[in-house]
Amino acid sequence: MPLVNKVKIIAFTHKITDINDIGKLHIEENALQGRLAFLKQEADLDELLYLSTCNRVEFMLSNNESVNTTYLKKFFTAFNPVWNESEINWAIENAQVFEGDDALRHLFNVASSIDSLVVGEREIITQVRNAYEKCSEFNLTGDLIRLAIKKTVETAKDVYTHTNIARNPVSVVSLAYRKLRELNVKQDARFLIIGSGVTNTTMAKYLKKHKFANFTIFNRTLANAQKLAEELNGTAYTLSELKNYTKGFDIIVTCTGASESIITSEIYKSLVGEDRSKKVVIDLAIPNDLDAEILNNYDVNLIAINNLQEVAKENLQAREQELHACGTIIEKNIIEFKQLLKTRKVELAMSEVPKKMKEIRETANEVFAKEILSLDSGSKEVLDKILSYMEKKYISVPMKMAKAILIEDIKNN
């Protein structure tokens, strides 16, 4: 099997799956290593990479099995052992499967932001790189995914450099901020920022840049909340203190990695107290941090991922003319990657040559032991130099010949 055919992707994106439902595939940070290690073992994977963002979850696999319905059932049963049959069937029905060239094409499109909710945003390339580093740290990845991600990052940079796809870049955060500005929010508005990860930190920088200054930050880890609070000249609390906060607010900005709503009806009731004025909630978490029931009982202007999609479509239309140029670059990089894999296959095959050559040399020393013993020290030294020289040549020459044959084969095809 060609190495490229071992690359598979199981994807859940905003194009196929409701964004709120994508949250079902989110894994909390403290459970990530254990669950992914279990999944790799139970799904018979050579390598595994897991990418989770606000509008997609992707599994990149390396194995020899075909990703059909039977395999997907085994895969999702291992992904979440507490899922019932209905939940497993939901995952199977919503999963997009890519194999071989199609998997590479999809991966390159994702990292180049062509497949993003907001086409042209550059955050995704960092998210892909971070996902790889995390899975590599967990010993889930190997040589194939390492090479694929390296080429993916190169491809994305190629697209950003040689097309206008990312000209005047926008992002989910910038779209959310644009929506907020349309509401004519007062400069003295009181902000509660829940979570101090990349998304909220970026949003906070937008707010600070536009002269908002009243911030209270909540985060599971107090040190991270304090770090963001220092930048904003705000106040920091642990997330557990949210239910006790009674100083009021005008706007909540929330984005955590929680698998369930962290702003429950009870907590929201405590936060608003007797204040019945209309509030704004910017919820960029997947799944949403704000309990949907709150919208039925309180006057809330919600800005969330799913209601930014219309603005994102307008952004896509403005960049559509660049998609052909991006596609050309991506196809070129797919060809280059397949050439790289062929070369790598030869390198791996040839990696045994040095060991074999040493074995042959040791055998020769045994076979000709008497003759070698009869030589004087000078002759032994010359013989040793000759054998060492030939050993090196026997290693390098086949490699050069094999690469030359590969290059010629690629040219002819």
Image: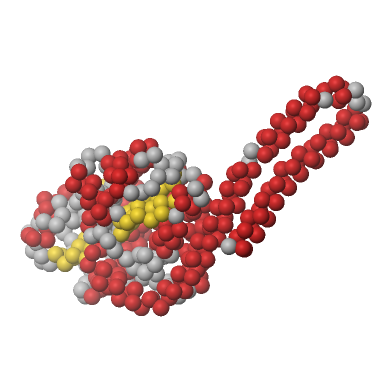
Q: Quadrant of the C terminus?
A: bottom right
Above or below: residue 342 compared with residue 139: below
Image position, residue 351 (x, y; %): 63, 41
Residue 308 falls left or right of residue 230: left
Image position, residue 128 (x, y; %): 42, 56
Residue under the point 78% across and 28% down: 364
Residue 158 falls left or right of residue 194: right
Whether residue 197 is visible to the viewer of this picture, yes or no, is: no
Q: Residue furthest front?
A: 412
> Quarter-wise, where is residue 369 in the image?
top right
> Quarter-wise, where is residue 356 in the image?
top right
Whether residue 231 is visible to the viewer of this picture, yes or no, is: yes
* Foreground of the two, 158 or 227: 158
Residue under the point 15% across and 54% down: 291
Colour mode? secondary structure
Image position, residue 107 (x, y; %): 42, 58
Residue 35 falls left or right of residue 399: left
* Foreground of the two, 178 or 131: 131
Q: How many numbered callouts?
A: 0
> Quarter-wise, where is residue 279 in the image?
bottom left
Residue under the point 38% across and 76% down: 320
Residue under the point 68% across and 48% down: 399
